[in-house]
Amino acid sequence: MPDRVVRRAAVDDADLVAELLHTFNTEFDTPSPGAPALADRLRELLAEPHTFALLGGDPAVGVALVTLRSNVWYPGPVALLDEMYVAPHARGAGIGGAIVDRLVAECRRGGVSAIEINVDEGDVDAQRFYERHGFFGGDPDTGERAFYFSQEL
């Protein structure tokens, strides 16, 4: 079983991050442009300050991909956890929790004001996981559920 070490990915890790993301999509029958195309994109994105990835485990069996953006409502950037994945054989060993803990620590150090995560309605395991780590599926003041809407262009 891989250990729970979590590190920030470097540009040189683009192939590894891409492979984990491609495996994630493949596992859940979601289209992927393929690991090589993802790696090309990641080499560009990871070189800039608005995208970072965290790798969990040694060897790496988990990944979180995060983008940062400005927001009028907060003094600091808002982080969006674009993707998070832990390989099936490593689930339940605390690697996902270690990745989220590192994500929160990195964001605090970077002056991030909020972290947003989109979770599919039917993915109750992920919802429970994020709630255990202090995230809310709605407005913490009113309790109203939050919804995510999108439109691909």
Image: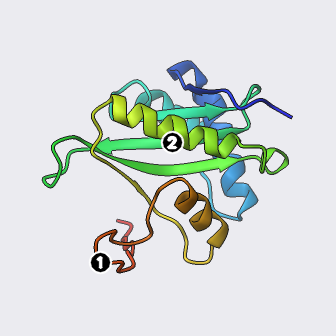
Q: Residue at x 68, y 52 (%)?
A: 24
Q: Residue at x 52, y 21 (%)?
A: 10
Q: Quadrant of residue 59?
A: top right
**Residue 37 visible here:** no
Where residue 25 appears, as percent x and y from the top left, is 66, 56
Position of residue 108 in the picture relative to residue 29 (left or right): left
Mark 1: secondary structure:
loop
Q: Are marks 2 and 1 in contact (CB under 8 Å)?
A: no
| In-front residue for pair 82/134 | 134
Q: Is residue 76 above or below residue 125?
A: above
If you read the primary sequence from the N terminus, does the residue marked by circle 2 or circle 1 appear first?
A: 2
Q: Residue at x 57, y 58 (%)?
A: 132
Q: Amino acid at mark 1?
A: Thr
Q: Residue at x 72, y 56 (%)?
A: 26
Label 2 CA crowd tier, 10 Å (few <14, some 14–19, many 20+)? many
- Where does label 2 land, which residue? 65
- Where does label 1 land, which residue? 142
Q: Nearer the viewer, mark 2 or mark 1?
A: 1
Q: Quadrant of the C terminus?
A: bottom left
**Residue 6 visible here:** yes
Where residue 19 appears, as percent x and y from the top left, is 68, 38
- In 3D space, how far apart are the residues under numbered discs 2 and 1 (Cα atoms)? 29 Å
Q: Quick one: which residue is furthest to the bottom in this view?
A: 144
| In-front residue for pair 87/21 | 87
